Image (tube, rainbow, N blue to C red):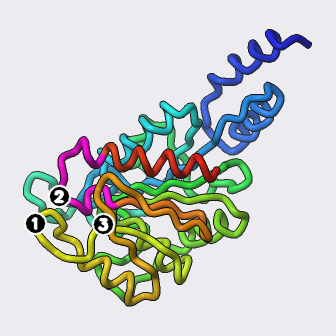
Amino acid sequence: MSVGDCNCCWQQFNYVLFADTAHIQLVLSARKFAGVMVKCIAIVLSGCGVYDGTEIHEASAVLVHLSRAGAKVQMFAPDVDQMHVVNHCEGKPTAEKRNVLQESARIARGDVSDLTKLDITAFDALVIPGGFGVAKNLSDWAVKGKEYTVQPQVEKLIKGFHGVGKPLAMCCISPVLAARALPGCEITVGQDSECERWPYAQTATTMTELGCKHVNKNVGEVHVDVKNKLVTTSAFMCNAPIHEVFDGVGVMVTELLKLA
């Protein structure tokens, strides 16, 4: 078989939709067959919308930077009810009920899978964007603060990727998941001194109290915990212009792919 034939085969496989794990495994076989090392990245979402789900701009930034780097992605979310639904015009909870998986499908353009179907062996790395859904649907940080717990399936996946040496990236509030799942890890959620630009700086103090090492970083920077293969950045923990958040997420993706 010629190189041209291999390239032709790869182009055909390149259009496979990641509908389920079987398809993901097919793509993994294809990339090995074609000799092209395309990174496969799992993204865990927590709904749709900053106040009760995934922060949409952060998720979009992750997707854009991964796409530009030539990575393949599959999005996942837990098939559970949201903690609550927030009217994003008023910032107030409503009596409405919504499902995390169904809401995440809005970001994924319908191509999202139940979190229980995430097979660690099919992926090179895991990314978890921020948003209050992390603190409400992937954990109970929003309710319990320092006494929080991480949703069991999410904690299992974080530990699973870490256990086989596969890197993780988290931005905004999502590093709190790593703080609980990987005790003693190094993270950043930005700065530890509260001001108008850093309104959530108290989170850094809490992370330190939990035994993590918090490293102060600006919005365009990341911290790489080399030992744990964990890349974190502050994103909208900083009251920054959206392009600065976008660029910081880009640095996070770049550093993640170096480790993958």
Residue span colored magenta: 234-245
Q: Residue at x 50, y 38 (%)?
A: 66
3D distance between C-alphas at marks 3 and 1: 13 Å
How far from the left and from the top, in percent, is residue 168?
Answer: 55, 59
Are the two marked residues, 1 and 2, in contact with CB atoms closer than 8 angstroms?
yes
- Name the spot of residue 133 as percent of width and height, x first: 34, 62
Please identify the quarter of the rendering in which residue 40 is found: top right
Q: Earlier in the sequence, mark 2 or mark 3?
A: 3
At label 2, the amino acid type is Asn
Mark 3 — residue?
190
The answer to if 18 sits in the magenta stretch is no
Which residue matches tag 1? 196
Q: Secondary structure at mark 3?
A: loop
- Whether 241 is among the magenta residues is yes
C-beta proximity under 8 Å, tags 3 and 1: no
SS category of the residue bearing label 2: loop
User: In this figure, which residue is indicated by the disc labeled 2?
Assistant: 239
